[in-house]
Image: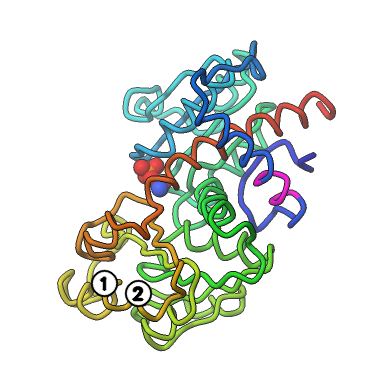
């Protein structure tokens, strides 16, 4: 049983809660391989996806997760909503709440926006990524992909390379993976690595080789030009040459290591096309696990709501 009405970040989640989400998501992942992806677990419940930033994977997988479980799903994009007329996030939330909805999945460019919304609505709020803060459902799907490959999280070494500073994915993975006993190594240019990251449990590597040495999972992260003002590295081609994950670096990882990327990927920048499309890549499996994780969260949050609200 989850302990809160909302899923705002993995910093707030206990190891027990994360394990329960992953166990439920594992069953949902099997369900997705079935012929009929139909359940009435969420019949009569309503999910709103409220996205103030672009998304393909997160928004669509929340929508499918709700629909596969029998919920009513409505998508709102900020660009075509009353947000454009100056409505605040809290007023938007209260308006949706008044329509007797059960869930809001939100993506917002401002860190903390999902928490602000959660404090002002009765619906359960699921964070689909808030600024540079957290992207908990992404980290959960990354963890599910690793757990299904290796049968465990405890004792794994995961190397994360790329734009750590602007990455909510890196932070949520760091919290989730270390809570379940994995080691997280990070490597990036100094300008793209928060100075305090080791205090949060990351091991900072001095080279790509050190980060990848003995790793079970190697995750590339997208360079987030949209959150930068420039000047953090000379050029994309130099970034790729000195910090990208190249084919020949995989020899340092474990033999059965996997390549991960949250997407969207800049082909040839953070990962080579050979790695993205190769046999070691679990990037497509991550996407499928994303639907499973979001189904699991909706199920567990309904159980919480029925018991506590
Ligand atoms: N990984 C991820 O959040 O992708 P989208 O931006 O497509 O949702």
Q: Is mark 1 within 8 Å of ligand 1?
A: no
- Tell me the distance, in whole angstroms, between the alpha carbons under discs 2 and 1: 6 Å
The image position of residue 81, as x and y in percent, is 38, 23
Any part of residue 134 in sight:
no
Q: In this rendering, does residue 138 appear at all?
A: yes
**What residue did someone put label 2 on?**
250
Instruction: Read off the residue under disc 1.
Output: 247
Secondary element under disc 1, as helix, strand or loop, is helix
Q: Is residue 96 left or right of residue 189?
A: right
Query: Which quadrant of the render holds ligand 1?
Result: top left
Query: Looking at the picture, how far across and down is residue 132, in whole percent?
Result: 45, 58
Q: Which quarter shows the C terminus?
A: top right
- Residue 161 relative to residue 230: left or right: right
**Label pair 2/1, CB-CB below 8 angstroms:** yes
Q: Is residue 167 above or below residue 191?
A: above
- Looking at the rendering, the stretch of residues picked out in magenta corresponds to 17-22
**Front residue (pair 267, 58):** 267
Point out the image quarter for the N terminus: top right
Labelled disc at residue 267: none
Tell me which residue sits at (38%, 57%) in the image: 261
Image quadrant assignment for residue 224: bottom left
**Structural crowding at the residue carrying mark 1, measured as other residues with C-alpha within 10 Å and reported as few (<14), some (14–19) or many (≥20):** few
Q: Is residue 18 magenta?
A: yes
């Amino acid at each position: 049983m989850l302990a809160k009405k909302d899923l705002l970040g993995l910093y707030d989640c206990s190891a027990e809660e994360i394990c329960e989400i992953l166990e439920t998501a594992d069953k949902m992942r099997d369900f997705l391989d079935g012929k009929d992806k139909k359940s009435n677990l969420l019949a009569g419940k309503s999910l709103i996806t409220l996205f103030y930033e672009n998304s393909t994977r997160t928004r669509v997988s929340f929508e499918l997760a709700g629909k596969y479980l029998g919920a009513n799903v409505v998508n709102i994009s900020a660009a075509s909503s009353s947000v454009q007329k100056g409505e605040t996030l809290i007023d938007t939330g209260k308006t949706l709440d008044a329509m007797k909805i059960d869930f809001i999945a939100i993506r917002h460019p401002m860190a903390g926006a999902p928490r602000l919304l959660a404090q002002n609505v009765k619906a359960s709020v699921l964070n689909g990524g808030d600024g540079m803060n957290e992207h908990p459902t992404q980290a959960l799907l990354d963890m599910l992909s690793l757990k299904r490959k290796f049968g465990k999280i405890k004792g794994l070494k995961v190397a994360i390379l790329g734009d750590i500073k602007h990455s909510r994915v890196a932070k949520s993975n760091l919290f989730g993976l270390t809570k379940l006993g994995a080691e997280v190594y990070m490597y990036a240019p100094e300008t793209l690595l928060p100075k305090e990251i080791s205090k949060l449990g990351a091991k900072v590597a001095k080279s790509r080789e050190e980060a990848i040495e003995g790793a079970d999972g190697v995750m590339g992260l997208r360079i987030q030009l949209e959150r930068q003002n420039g000047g953090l590295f000379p050029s994309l081609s130099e970034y790729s040459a000195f910090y990208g994950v190249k084919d020949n670096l995989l020899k340092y990882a474990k033999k059965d290591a996997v390549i991960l990327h949250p997407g969207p990927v800049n082909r040839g920048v953070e990962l080579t096309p050979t790695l993205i499309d190769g046999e070691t890549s679990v990037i497509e499996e991550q996407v499928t696990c994303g639907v499973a994780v979001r189904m699991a969260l909706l199920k567990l949050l309904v159980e919480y709501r029925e018991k506590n609200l």
